Structure formats: C-alpha cells, structure tokens
Amino acid sequence: MCSSDLFIAGCKTSRKGTESAPNRVVSRDGSFELRDYPALTIVETKMDHDTGSSFQRLFRYISGANADGQKIPMTTPVFMEGDEPRRSMSFVMPSNMKSAPAPKDSALRVSSLPAGRFAVFVFSGSRSAEAEANALAQLRGWIEKSGLASSGKPVFGYFDPPWTPSFLRRNEVMLRVEAQAPEN
C-alpha cells in the first residue's frame, strides 16, 4: 500500500468509533432514506460568520467547559439548521446521557430535536451554500416524486473533520415528513 492509500484509508475511518445520532432506517432508495429519529438532546449555538468559532464554542462545552465540568464524547453529525443570519450549529448529546449539563457560555443552550420521521439525502463534498442548495433541491425533488409531504426547515448534518478530502466526506440534508409516509 503506498502512502497516499494509507492517507485515504485514514480519512475514511476518521469517524469510526464515534457515536452517531440514533435512528431507524425505514426505507432506502439510492442516496435517499426515510428515517425515524427519537427525540435528541442537543447543545446549540447561533452561528457566527466564522463557522470555526461556533464549532469551537461547542467543542469547549463537550471538553468540560460546562456547569458540571463533565467531558462529553463527540458525536456525529454536527447539525446546522436555519437561514442566514439565524443559522444555528449543534452537537447531539450521546444516547447514554440522562441529561446534558448546563452550559457556562451564555451563547450556548441545551435543547431538543423532537422525535419524528425524516427524509434524508446523503451527499459528499465540501460545505458551501451552493452544495447545500443543490442537495436540498435533490431531496425536495425526491420527496415530491415519492408522494411525501415535508415540513419545517432543512437540517444539514456534517460527519467528518475538516482535513478529510471533500470527495470522502459524508454530509446529509434532512426534512421532517409526515409519520404515516408510505414505506417502500
């Protein structure tokens, strides 16, 4: 194996061993899925123009800068929701946590993503407004073709660290759909 193969193999496994938000796949159609999610406890912050500072604020929280001084394992994905200038970034709390410690930073808040069924489109590439708009358009087209009804704002999920080459990154966009959606 040459050194570039080792680099790529290392990037592919960078999220290995990291807990992902629990869900149950109801149906799959290529890169599209219907998933049921339980209620998820999240810690969120309003996004700054500099995405890195929002991420660092959340990372400090899970690193122990919270009311209990508790270190919390990183989970995937990092969620981004809403439109500029009211966009938020959030971390999902691990499923084994009974409650999330209160934030010390007033720019953070503990919240909940209510349980429900979501239509999801999985895509790769770097995060950009253009990539998000394209992915969302594809998801909305699939939802319409599938005879589903969506509601709410899209939620984007990002799984990989920034050093992962864009073609290896796993990203998702999700929209809530009616729970009685037909199973394929």
Image: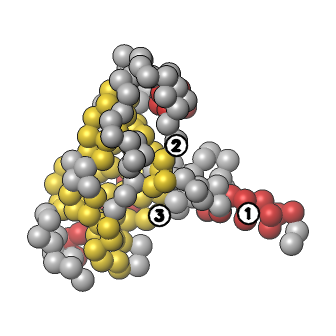
Indicate the position of residue 61 as horizontal and vertical percent values: 48, 27
Indicate the position of residue 63 as horizontal and vertical percent values: 55, 29
Q: How far apart are marks 3 and 1 (CA)?
A: 18 Å
Which element type, helix, strand or loop, lies under badge 2? loop
Which is more N-terminal, label 1 or label 3? Answer: 1
Q: Nearer the viewer, residue 76 or 120?
A: 76
What crowding class fits label 2: few (fewer than 14 Cα within 10 Å), some (14-19), or many (20 or more)?
some
Instruction: Pick the quarter of the image with the C terminus.
Output: bottom left
Q: Residue at point 80% right, 67% down?
A: 5
**In this view of the protein, can residue 171 be seen by the observer?**
yes
Indicate the position of residue 144 as horizontal and vertical percent values: 20, 71
Q: Residue most toward the right?
A: 2
Which is more N-terminal, label 2 or label 1? Answer: 1
Q: For mark 3, what is the residue?
A: 123
Residue 168 versus residue 88 in the image, above or below: below
How are the colours assigned in the image?
secondary structure
Q: Which of 92 and 133 is in front in this view?
A: 92
Q: Nearer the viewer, residue 11 or 131?
A: 11
Q: For mark 2, what is the residue?
A: 74
**In this view of the protein, can residue 84 be seen by the observer?**
no
Amino acid type at mark 3: Phe
Amino acid type at mark 2: Met
Q: For mark 1, what is the residue?
A: 8
Q: With 107 as the anchor, is 34 left or right in this view?
A: left
Instruction: Pick the quarter of the image with the N terminus.
Output: bottom right
